[in-house]
Amino acid sequence: MDFIKITGLVAGTITTISFLPQVIKTWKSKSAKDLSLGMFLIYCTGIALWIGYGVIINDLPLIVANVLTLLLSSTLLFFKLRFKD
C-alpha cells in the first residue's frame, strides 16, 4: 500500500471513530432527544453516495471509512427512531 492510501485509511479511521462516543452515550442513556432526525437522514444518504463513488473509482480507503461511518451513523439514526423522546 502506498503512502496516499495509508493516509486515507488513517484519516477515515479517525473521522469514523469520532461517532463512537455519541453512539455509546446514546446507547447507555437510551435517549436520542438531542439528535436531529433530519440531519442523520441526510447524512446517511450522503455517506451511502460516498460509498457508491468509492466503489466506482475503486478507492478502498474511501469505501472502508464510509462503510464504517454509515454503520455508526445508521446506529444513531436507529436509536433516534427507537428511543422516542
Image: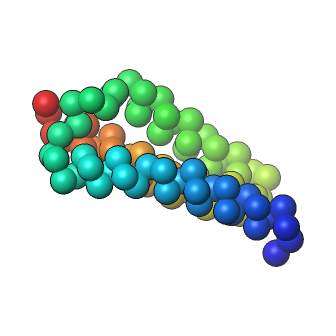
Q: Quadrant of the N terminus?
A: bottom right
Counting every numbered tag in the picture gives: 0
Q: Residue at x 49, y 56 (%)?
A: 17
In the figure, is residue 8 to the left or right of 80? right
- Among the 4 quarters of the image, the one containing residue 2: bottom right
The location of residue 34, given as percent across then percent down, is 27, 29
Residue 64 in which image quadrant: bottom right
Which residue occupies the foreground of this view, 6 or 50? 6
| Residue in the image at 67% along x and 56% along y | 11
Query: Measured along the vertical axis of the image, is residue 32 above or below residue 38?
Result: below
Residue 63: x %, y % from top left = 64, 57
Residue 25 in view here: yes
Residue 65 visible at all:
no
- Residue 68, position as x, y percentages in the image: 51, 58
In terms of depth relative to the viewer, which is nearer, 16 or 56? 16
Percent coordinates x, y for residue 26 in the rendering: 25, 46
Residue at x-position 33% and y-position 40%: 77
The residue at the far top in this view is 38
Lateral position of residue 79 relative to residue 64, left or right = left
Image quarter of the C terminus = top left
Up-down: is 31 above or below 33?
below
Residue drawn at point x = 15 percent, y = 46 percent: 30
Query: What coloring was used for the rendering?
Result: rainbow
